[in-house]
Amino acid sequence: MVLVKLTINGKEVEVQEGTSILKAAEQAGVDIPRLCYDDSLEPVGACRLCIVEVKGARNLVPSCVTAVSPGMVVETESPKVIKSRRMTLDLLLSNHPLECLTCDKNGDCRLQDYAYLYDVKHSSFEGEKNNYTIDDSNPYIIRDMNKCILCGKCVRTCAQVKERQVINFANRGFNTKIAPAMDTLLAESACVSCARCLVVCPVGALTYKNLAGKGRTYEIKKEQVTCFFCDAGCQFDLNYKGDNVIGVTARAPGEGRPLCLKGRLGMELLYSDHPQPPMLKKDDKFVEVSWAEALGLESVLDKLMEQEKK
Ligand code: SF4
Ligand code: SF4
Ligand code: SF4
């Protein structure tokens, strides 16, 4: 293993060759802001928030896609870096509704966190804002593309499971947005409601319908459970408000885990205090179904009934 020595914010760090500056900083206990980066995804260096100053480099560099080199001297919070991050946030807020008061992501939103950290209260740019209709066609997911910051994490996450790849970037320039093929409603697409994209979305663009308005993020305590329906062993969170489980959410889509709807519904039935009736797609339309059908247990139950009759 070849080790590389560099300096980050005046502190000497030694990391493995090929490590990104962002990960090297993490090892040194320095947190670099990021919106499009996730440990479970290939870094793309798109959001420009993780930029840092490297001594001798002509421009600021995106730390998630820049590898360390011997003797590198990095500053992660220099005046130049802060100015650039403030400009990036300013531009993002120029086309973002300032609805934090009622947004279900309030308290768990990276854009909000960084706007606070860098004291960007509103945008200095005036101009048109997107005004997309909120897509709540899917019984489990709300998509508000007005809040989307086009980080692409949902697209890359959905595509991790080959047969899905449901959403992608559509249109260009100001009209760029994330959409299913042919820009249909989510309910009309091939989406399997796994919620992997919700786990990684850093803002309030993708949220759980069953949790809407049920509690602020800071009122909710989470407890991890592991699904036992198949060998994948996906992890879910029970969301407690007080003593009640108000809903189950998916977590950590890494390692290619499917985080399937069946697993999440199963956890809902087992743990939620008031599980909502399950909905499955039939003839391209979502309809309410029995729990046995939702969990794929109908044939098992039929068999049991037959045995009991004998
Ligand atoms: S997505 Fe974040 S910044 Fe936008 S309204 Fe919601 S909490 Fe506020
Ligand atoms: S819920 Fe799952 S299948 Fe649907 S868009 Fe999100 S990641 Fe893709
Ligand atoms: S919906 Fe969320 S995860 Fe997807 S691009 Fe927009 S902000 Fe990023």
Image (cartoon, grey):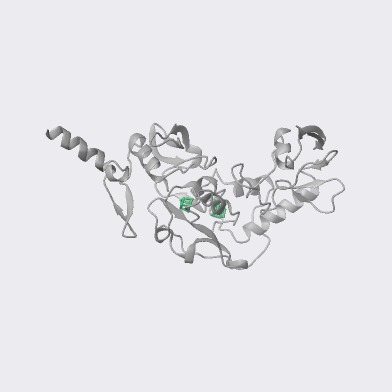
Side (left or right) of 36 relative to 180: right
The answer to whether residue 172 is above or below residue 158 is below
Residue at (81%, 33%) from the top-left corner? 11
- At a point 80% along the width and 45% down the height, the residue shown is 78
Q: Quadrant of residue 150?
A: bottom right
Q: Name the outermost residue toward the left.
A: 310
Instruction: Answer left or right for 69 relative to 110.
Output: right
The residue located at (54%, 41%) in the rendering is 254
Look at the picture and state if 164 lies above or below 32: below
Q: Nearer the viewer, residue 57 or 92?
A: 57
Could you say where residue 96 lies in the image, as x and y percent from the top left? 58, 58
Quadrant for the C terminus, please.
top left
Q: Position of residue 180 (x, y in %)?
A: 48, 61
Q: Is residue 165 left or right of residue 13?
A: left
Q: Is residue 269 above or below residue 282?
A: above
Residue 9 on image: x %, y % = 80, 37
Taking 13 as reference, is 46 above or below it? below
Residue 45: x %, y % from top left: 68, 51
Query: Is residue 58 visible to us here?
Result: yes
Residue 144 shows in the view: no
Front residue (pair 44, 10): 44
Left or right of 260 on screen, residue 80: right
Q: Identify the image quadrant of residue 90.
A: bottom right
The number of numbered badges drawn on the structure is 0
Q: Quadrant location of the N terminus? A: top right
